[in-house]
Amino acid sequence: MDISKEDIIRINHGFGGTLRNDSSLDFAIDKQNDKKLGEYKKLSYLLRAILVDHPFSDGNKRTAMFICFAFSYEFNKEVDIDLLKHHMVSIAKKNENIIKNIEWRLKSAIK
């Protein structure tokens, strides 16, 4: 997925948030350039950085949802909105750190 740190910050700013800590976001952005990783895994790193590490003061889940919609649009995928919403809240509540689990959740909601 072609997205930059500035894009993510701009998206979040639209939801009323401000950047508090960008270290995990930087790590997730670096993973976007790893040719060995699949697109869902790259998206999983972004979502973990946003949903678990809460880099923004507000709008973390909304930012993650927006990125998922952009991902689905870019790769011409269908989204089960209710299931994706459930997964976003669950990942955030449970502080899900395991990328493989986040990837599985994404693949079940975005096909």
Image (cartoon, rainbow, N blue to C red):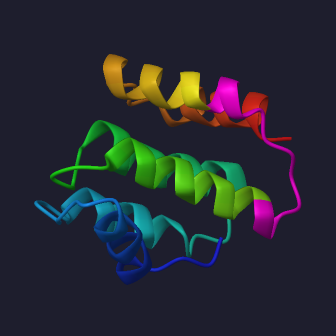
Residue 111 lies in quadrant: top right
Query: Taking 97 as reference, is 1 above or below it?
Result: below
The picture places residue 82, in percent across and down from the top left corner, at: 67, 26
Query: Does residue 78 appear left or right of residue 47 in this picture?
Result: right
- Residue located 49% across and 31% down the image: 88
Residue pictured at 64% horizontal, 32% vertical? 84
* Residue 83 sits inside the magenta stretch: yes
Work out whether residue 38 can be spotted: no
Q: Is residue 23 above or below residue 9?
A: above
Q: Position of residue 1 (x, y in %)?
A: 65, 70
- Above/below status of 84 relative to 13: above
Q: Is residue 110 magenta?
A: no
The region drawn magenta spans 73-84
- Res 87 quadrant in image: top right
Location of residue 86 by image quarter = top right
Image: 106 above or below 101 = below
Q: Nearer the viewer, residue 103 or 92?
A: 92
At which x and y percent is residue 83? 68, 24
Seen at 21% across and 54% down, the residue is 55
- Single out the residue that lies furthest toward the left: 20
Query: Closest to the observer: 101 or 90?
Result: 90
Residue 17 percent across, percent down from the top left:
22, 60
At horizontal 63% and vertical 36% (from top left) the residue drawn is 103
**Considering depth in this image, is 58 or 33 the residue closer to the camera?**
58
58 sits to left or right of 74: left
Residue 33 visible at all: yes
